[in-house]
Image (tube, rainbow, N blue to C red):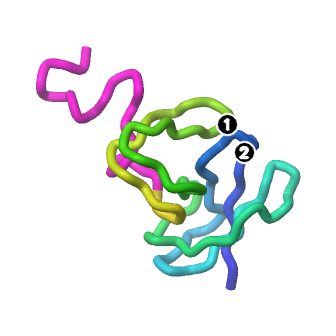
Amino acid sequence: MSHKAIQIDEEDNIATVTSDTQDNEEVEVLSPEGKVIIKTKSLDSIPFGHKIALQNLKKGDKVVKYGEVIGVASKDIRIGEWIHINNLESSTVPASNLGKGEAA
């Protein structure tokens, strides 16, 4: 069975999965027009509604959803990885600075 993910804007480098996706399952990513733009394997178990990487990202790269930057990669991310707090950081208030007196 192939799972689906939706790219909201053509500039997005992530997509939203439309069902719970287990590690190593195939994911078809649909463009905003509904066409399959890539097929990849999920590298993690990704819960419904969460984000999957559409391209390899380096630490510090901008993460784009809805055509807008929603944060930066806090470490290198591979295509098919779950984008979540373990690898995504706010570009406004970096979580890595919390507790160090540097986030404000």
Image position of 34 (left or right of 99): right
> Which residue is located at x 71 percent, y 55 percent?
6
| Residue range of the region highlighted in magenta in the rendering | 83-104
Classify residue 61 by image quadrant: top left
**Residue 19 point in image, percent of width and height:** 62, 67
Tell me: residue 24, above or below residue 72.
Answer: below
Residue shown at 67%/36% (left/top)?
A: 66
Image quarter of the C terminus: top left
In the depicted structure, whether residue 24 falls above or below residue 35: below
Closer to the N terminus: mark 2 or mark 1? 2
- Do residues under tags 2 and 1 come within 8 Å of each other at their CB atoms? yes
**Which residue was labeled with disc 2?**
8
Rendering coords of residue 20 (x, y %): 56, 69
Estimate the x, y position of residue 11 in percent, counting from the top left: 70, 39
Q: Any magenta on residue 59?
A: no
23 and 47: which is toward the camera: 23
Question: Is the N terminus in the top left, top right, bottom left or bottom right quadrant?
Answer: bottom right
Residue type at mark 2 is Ile
Secondary structure beneath label 1: loop
Q: Is residue 94 above or below residue 34?
A: above
